[in-house]
Image: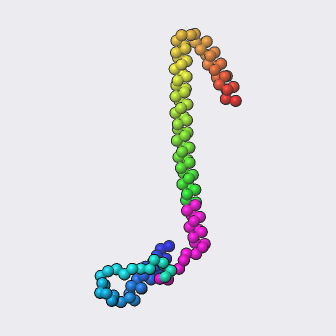
Amino acid sequence: MSTEEGSAHAAIGAIKKNLGLRKNGKQWKESKTPQRLRAIGVPKTGWQKREQERQQRVAMKEREREMTEERQEAIRERVRRIKERAEEKAEKERYAKLSEKMHRKRVERLKRREKRNKLLKER
């Protein structure tokens, strides 16, 4: 693209040099350039080049999407771990309260029973 821009500037410069003095005397004003670059001799970009640039943009967007997904996954994992820790802490506190009221062996039996029920519930 830089070579095309350079050739465009060169072509515009050539047009300015060939114009000479203005008839109305406003030489300090900048002369306008044509809107269409093909009018001053800048060739179109080839189909292969445009297709290659498009594929590069698509690949870049895909990589950005992957990076965003990785970040989101890391955040979800961190939140999941925090929730698990909070649940474990709450369960520990609950068992501590129960052990104050009940005998230690009965609390252990309750723990085992709840674990079994939890495993059956997950299936």
Residue drawn where x is 29% and y is 87% of the image: 25
Vertical placement of 98 versus 31: above or below?
Answer: above
Tell me the quarter of the picture where residue 18 sits. bottom left
Residue depicted at 44% across the width and 83% down the height = 11
Residue at left offset 55%, top offset 22%: 91
Which of the 4 image quadrants contains residue 74? top right
Q: In the image shown, does 20 or 2 lie closer to the viewer?
A: 20
Residue situated in front as seen by the camera: 70 or 48? 48
Specify whether 103 is left or right of 30. right
- Main SS, magenta residues: helix
Residue 62: image x %, image y %? 58, 56
Residue 123 as seen in the image, left or right of residue 3:
right
**Image vertical order of residue 90 relative to residue 44, above or below:** above
Task: Give x and y (percent) for residue 73.
Answer: 56, 43
Vertical position of residue 89 compared to residue 65: above or below: above
Q: Is residue 48 magenta?
A: yes
Q: Quadrant of the C terminus?
A: top right
Q: Any magenta on residue 79? A: no
Q: Which residues are magenta?
A: 40-58
